[in-house]
Image: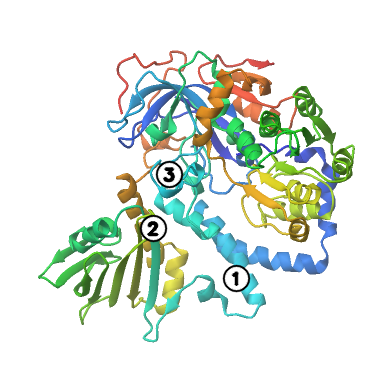
Amino acid sequence: MTPNLTSNMTSRPYREHSTESLLSPAERGVMGVLGLAALTLSLRGNALERLLLGAVGVGLAGMAATGTNPLATALKIRQNEEGDTLVSDAITIGQPPEQLYAIWRDLTNLPLLMRHLKAVELLDERRSRWTVPGPVGDVSWEAELTADEPGRRIAWRSLPGASIQNSGEVLFLPAPGDRGTEIRVNLAYHAPGGTTGAVIARLTGQEPSQQLRDDLLRFKREQELGFAPTTQGQSSGRAAQNGHYRQAQDHAPRTAGEAGRNA
Amino acid sequence: MKAVVWQHTNKMGVERVPDPTLLLSTDAIVRVTSTAICGSDLHLLDGYIPGMERGDIVGHEFMGEVVEVGRDVRRVRVGDRVVVPFNLACGVCDPCRRGLFSACDNSNPAPNARTVEALYGAMSPSGLFGYTHLFGGYAGGQAQFVRVPFADVGCFKIESDLRDEQVLFLTDIFPTGYQAAEQCGIVPGRDVVAVFGAGPVGQFAARSALMLGAAHVIVVDRVPERLSMAEAAGCQTINYEKEDVLVALRDATGGRGPDHVIDAVGLEAHGHGPGALLDTAEQKMRMSFDRITAVRWAILSCAKGGTVSMAGVYAGLVDKFPLGAAFGKGLVFRMGQTHTHRYVIPLLERIEAGQIDPSFVITHRASLDEAPELYKTFRDKKDGCIKVVLDPWGQPGQVHKV
Ligand SMILES: [Zn+2]
Ligand SMILES: [Zn+2]
C-alpha cells in the first residue's frame, strides 16, 4: 500500500475545470453511455456489489457495441437444450482427493458445505431427501446417486416429481505438484422464471453460481485452515446501535497484567 | 475504546466504539501503542476505494502489546510486544507457502472474496486491516485495541529495545519500499534507479535501492520537503513541476534512461498531458479508479531491458497505457501488494544492525484525537507533513511537528 505523491487536487484548480473541454463530443457520448449503463446497474446491490456491477455495466456496453446479445452472456448464464440452467465452478484445495471425496460422500455433510441446503436425509443406499428453505416454506425433493467413484467422482439427480428438477456431479482431480486437489462441481437445475429469473437472481446475489462459489471458498478455508475467517461481530462505529457497547477508559490504558478483559 | 472511523468520503472521525473481542480461537487482541496514517488511507478519505461502510475502523500500520489470545494461538503470548503486517495471511495456503503472503487465498472471507474474483478474474488476494470490505473489511489499528486474526502468522515479536517508531513501519511502508527496490534486481555498482513519488514509500524505496547497491538513485516529486528528505539520503532529485521529467531523466543517465523505475505513487497521480487530464476526468465521473501518470512516465523513461516496479496501489481498469514503448524496450513489470510477512525479520535485522533508522520519515506526532485533522494535513501536504504517527493513549489536543 502506497502513499501517492501528489493527491492534492485542490492545488491545480485550472486543470480540474479544463478537463471536460478536452473530451470530444464523440468521446463524451461514449463515456455517457458507459456511465449510464454502469450507473443503472450499480444503483442496485450493496456497497460491495456496486463495483462489480459497475464493471458489468462497462462490459455490457462493450458487448452491445460489438453487436452481441449482452445480458445473459455478460452474466455468464448458461443453459442446455432442455432449458436447464447450468452452473459449474472449480477450486484447488491443499488436501488429498480421498479426504475431500470422503467428506462429500457423506451426503448428510452437504448442508455444511452448501449453505442454501437445509438438510439432506439418507433414505437408503442410493436415495436421499434434500430440503431447501423457500420464500413460502421449505421445499423438499428426493434424489438418487447416479455415480460413485471413490476418490474421484460423485453424481446425483433429483427423482421424477421433484419441485426443483436438478442434477449434479463433483469431480476430485489431483492437482499438479503438491497443490492438493482440483474440485470441479457441475450443476443443472430448472430455474423458476427461466432466463429472466436467473438474471434477476444473479443481480440480487441469490443465484446458484454465486452461492456455489461462496460454498467452494468456504470449503477450501475449512479444509486448509480448519475454520472460516470472519469479521462478523467485530468492532465498528456501527455496533453502538446494536446494544453491545462498552465504554473504555482511554486515560487508563489496560495492560496485559490487568485482569478482567474477557472475550 | 477510541478509534478512527470512516464516516464518509472526506470525513474521518474519532468515535467511541466497542472494544474488540476474540471472534475465533486463532485471534489475538493487541493493545495498540503506536499507529500511523498511510498514503493509502488517503484513497479511503478521498473516496477512490469502493466498499467502505460508515463506521469502519481504519488504519493498517500499528503495533502494540498482546493482551489476549485465543486458545489455538501457539506462537504469541500475552505480554509480547509485536508488529503486525497490514495484510492478513493464513500461512498454509499455496501462495502463503510460496512466500506470496499478500496473495493469500484464504484470509478474505468468502462472499467478499467472490466479489473481488469477479473483478480480478482470479482468486482474491489477502484481506487487509482497516480497508475496504472488498478485502475483508477487517477492523483496523487506528484504535486503542485491535483484533488480530491469524495471530500466529501475523504477529512478529520485537525483543530488542528499539523504540516503537523504529519498528512501526515494518508493518507496511518499509517493506513496501524495500520490495519495490528488491524486485528491480539491482546490479550493485552499475544500475541507476529512478523513484517516482517521494512520499513515505518512495523514501523507503530510494533508501532500499541504495542499501541494495544502486550506483545512483534519482527521486521525482514536486514537494520540496519530500525532495529534501531524499537528498539527505544521497539521492539526486527532480521536481517535475520545474523540469520536463522525461528529458531530465534522460539527461541524468547519459541518454539511456534509468535501468529500473519504481512507481511509488499509485492511483492518485498528478501530471501533465492529455492522458493525465483524461484520467482525472474519468476518475471524477467514477468511470475509472486510477490515474496512471506515474506508470506512463515510468515506461517512457525506463532504459531498454529495464524494470518497472510498481508499489503504488491501483484499483481497476486503465487505458492510454504505452504498451508499444514497453514492448519495444523489452521492459519487465513487477508489481503487487507487499508480501510484508516475508520482510519483517530481515528488515528488523537491518534496523538492529544500524543500517537504517526508519523513524527518519516521521514529521508529525499526535494523539488519536487529532487523526481527522492530520489526515487532511497529510493529504494536502501542508505543514511539511510526510508521515504521521499517532499515540492511541495520548492526551488530546497536541500535535508535535518533528
Ligand atoms: Zn499503508
Ligand atoms: Zn494463505
Residue A149 in sight: yes
Q: Is residue B269 left or right of residue B18?
A: right
Mark 1 crowdedness (10 Å alpha carbons): few <14, some 14-19, many ≥20: many
Mark 2 crowdedness (10 Å alpha carbons): few <14, some 14-19, many ≥20: some
Disc 3: which residue: B97
Q: Residue A258: image x %, image y %?
A: 34, 14
- Would you say the beta carbon of the disc 3 residue lies within 8 angstroms of ligand 2? yes
Mark 3 or 2, which is nearer the eye?
A: 3
Out of B368 and B104, give the one closest to the viewer. Answer: B104
Mark 3 or 1, which is nearer the eye?
A: 3
Q: Identify the residue at horizontal 44%, vertical 47% (top origin).
A: B108
Q: Quadrant of the C terminus of chain A?
A: top left
Q: Residue A247: image x %, image y %?
A: 40, 23
Badge 1 marks a residue whose secondary structure is helix
Disc 1: which residue: A60
Badge 3 marks a residue whose secondary structure is helix
Q: Residue B301: image x %, image y %?
A: 81, 47
